[in-house]
Amino acid sequence: METVDSRNKLHSRLRLWEFPDQYIIEPADGSGSSCLDISRVDASMKLIDQVPESNSVRVPKIRSIFGVVGMLKLLAGSYLVVVTESERVGSFLGHPIFKVTTLKVLPCDHSLKNSPEEQKKMETEFSKVLSVAEKTTGLYFSYEVNLTLSSQRLHEMGDESKSLPLWRQAEPRFLWNNYMLEVLIDNKLDQFLLPVIQGSFNSFETAIGRDIVDITLIARRCTRRNGTRMWRRGADLDGYVANFVETEQIVQMNGYTSSFVQVRGSMPFMWEQVVDLTYKPKFEIVQPEEAKRIAERHFLDLRKKYGSVLAVDLVNKQGGEGRLCEKYATVMQHITGDDIRYLHFDFHQICGHIHFERLSILYEQIEGFLEKNGYFLLNEKGEKMKEQLGVVRSNCIDCLDRTNVTQSMIGRKMLEVQLKRIGVFGAEETISSHLNFDEHYKILWANHGDEISIQYSGTPALKGDFVRYGHRTAHGVLKDGWSSLRRYYLNNFADGTKQDAIDLLQGHYIVAVSRDMAPVPQKGGLEAVANFPVALFVVLMSFWFATMSLKQTGSDYKHKHLFFSLLWTGICVGMAALVRANGRIFCNRPRLHKPRG
């Protein structure tokens, strides 16, 4: 495979010099290239020949870094984002892949000294959001290959495109730091521009007879409607959906390379769940009159990028989910045709909570589509023998748990087809025939599901024990219960701030100083002490009083004690309601932000 032109090749080793008034990023890969000088006063950038001299007044702090992720501008200061720790996790088509283990945000905010006091306060508030951004998980990069494109799309690129800097080859949808790179792009710093994706990357090697088979699973999260579980649902007016993920399964053996791509994403019309402290907030369909147009845009985009589309809807037909299911099915009646199909499969009704082997019923319904649209295959000479002509698009409510179980089943079936085509498997042979292979393959998909779930919901995937072991376990059911409780807490008390950080990093909101910028209101009274620990204390106390009240209830006083139980519950909910916005900056002060483009 052609690689990037040496003149555009990324620096793989860097040294960061932190002077009091400037950051110097020095290539440490022996290339002898220029250093990048970034002012800590106004964030201006320029290339210089060498690192400046240090002295007793200008003593630098020196550290190794592994890439420049980008630059963010807030009210008065700018902030440089770099990778300070990483680990190699495998290879993609022969090129090393690294996972970001530590991000660091470095302030270029000395100009704040001369800023108004209120602006300083607001800058401090925004910079706290960046500390949340430093904890972003599931970030991957390569110095040599474009991770944003599937094997098939990389193969279809012309030699001229492959010689461009990696950021110029990248698919913007999957370039996690697309917005943060803009300042560096404007300064023509190609060798410092590190493209990063968010998703997952897992691989393993196993022996089948004399053959060594390499299996890789890579997921790419779309940045267009990125966010957390309850704060990003459905689609926007442009047809971009929440939690859209492209998952590519790659098998390499004896010079052959074959890949199979699936996608997942929220139901493609506008709907939401407003966080209100209930365990499962009500589903609300927003602007229903726009649903058909939004879905058309979404599927037109999928059709253009992937070919034929089979939309597999896994939600319930009953209850709140049923309303969404009905809307989805109604919208799809106007869109389906030769290249776009819709199939509803009531996962919970058919499979329940333990009988996931009944997914074979779904496979029988989609087998024809999979056979017709196939997979991508290169022979030992790198020549294309087959191409994938269509994609299965799966969804449930969160596009996490039911979706991951279903995608792992489809991936397993297609891998068996690919291995038979390459000649590794006989006609009746399956992955289950090889215990070691089977075990590693289950773990591969379970880890994939957990990582995607953590990024969207904050917890590992539910039903992961089936993917990991092939059956439900008592431990898995208990773990799912605990994860569900954690999701409830995160939805109500943490994800709002995390959503702010995501919106800031991805440029969905751009900080701007408004002419009518008002002073930050000071909290007083009960609101000043209304935070999660207080709310949690009241919750626990209310449950304790309610329990004790009911325990002492005699038949003559039952209604009286029930009244007081409800009273304490009401106090609990009232106190917790004071903190349900969980500190979101963007929803509280929209005047300081403008949506990007």
Image (cartoon, rainbow, N blue to C red):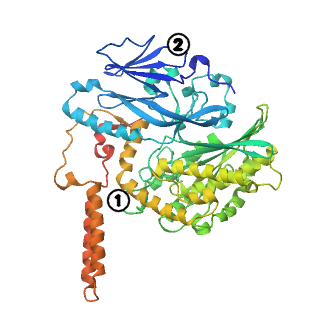
The C terminus lies in quadrant: top left
Q: Residues within 10 Å of mark 2 (few under 14, many from 20)?
A: few
- Residue at 58% in and 55% down: 403
Q: Quadrant of residue 368?
A: bottom right
* Position of residue 558 in the picture relative to residue 345 (left or right): left
Q: Residues within 10 Å of mark 1 (few under 14, many from 20)?
A: some
- Residue at 19% in and 56% down: 526
Q: How many marks?
A: 2
* Position of residue 188 in the picture relative to residue 439 (left or right): left
Helix, strand or loop status at disc 1: loop
The residue lying toward the viewer, choosing from 36 and 282, is 36
Q: Are marks 1 and 2 in contact (CB under 8 Å)?
A: no
Q: Amino acid at mark 1?
A: Asp
Residue 168: image location, x then y, percent: 56, 26
The residue beneath circle 1 is 276
**Up-down relation of residue 87 to residue 283 (above or below):** above
- Residue 66 seen by the camera: yes
Residue 273: image location, x then y, percent: 41, 57
First-in-chain label (1 vs 2): 2
Q: Amino acid at mark 2?
A: Gly
Q: Residue furthest left?
A: 525
Marks 1/2: CA–CA distance? 57 Å
The residue lying toward the viewer, choosing from 315 and 338, is 315
Residue 39: image location, x then y, percent: 35, 19
| Mark identifier at residue 192 | none
Residue 377: image location, x then y, percent: 75, 39
The residue beneath circle 2 is 32
